[in-house]
Image (tube, rainbow, N blue to C red):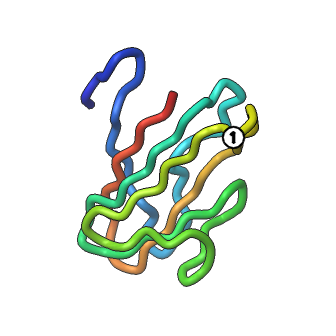
Amino acid sequence: MVVIGDSAIKTVAAGNTATAQVVAANSARTHLTIQNVSDTDVYLAEGTAAVSGQGFLLLAAGANIYVTGENGVIYMGAVNSITSAGSKALSVKEN
């Protein structure tokens, strides 16, 4: 884990053919970055089980999603993931 200021970048595993939680719901969330650092595409879902081929697609080798509050509004629920091949790494930073 790498600490940057008051937040940390952590590595979590994307689910292998079954959904896996990337981040839990967090009512204090102000920013969220998720980067796919694996060699396989990963799908993300907000608040529900992730399904391969549906939701937000993070392409292999570096695709990322950055979520910040616009006008004070940000998704604060859980984010789940799934991939088609093995347990794959995602880099996550949440403030």
Q: Residue at x 66, y 38 (%)?
A: 69
Taking the image as shown, residue 39 lies to the left or right of residue 71, namely left
- Decide which of 62, 15 is in the foreground and name it: 62
Residue at the farthest front position = 71
SS for dot 1: loop
- Decide which of 44, 75 is in the foreground and name it: 75
25 above or below 83? above
Q: Residue at x 71, y 28 (%)?
A: 27
In what quadrant of the picture does the N terminus appear?
top left
What residue does disc 1 label?
70
Taking the image as shown, residue 69 lies to the left or right of residue 8, namely right
Mark 1 belongs to which amino acid? Glu
- Decide which of 91, 80 is in the foreground and name it: 91
Percent position of residue 12, x then y: 38, 48
Residue at the farthest top position = 6
Percent position of residue 88, x then y: 32, 63
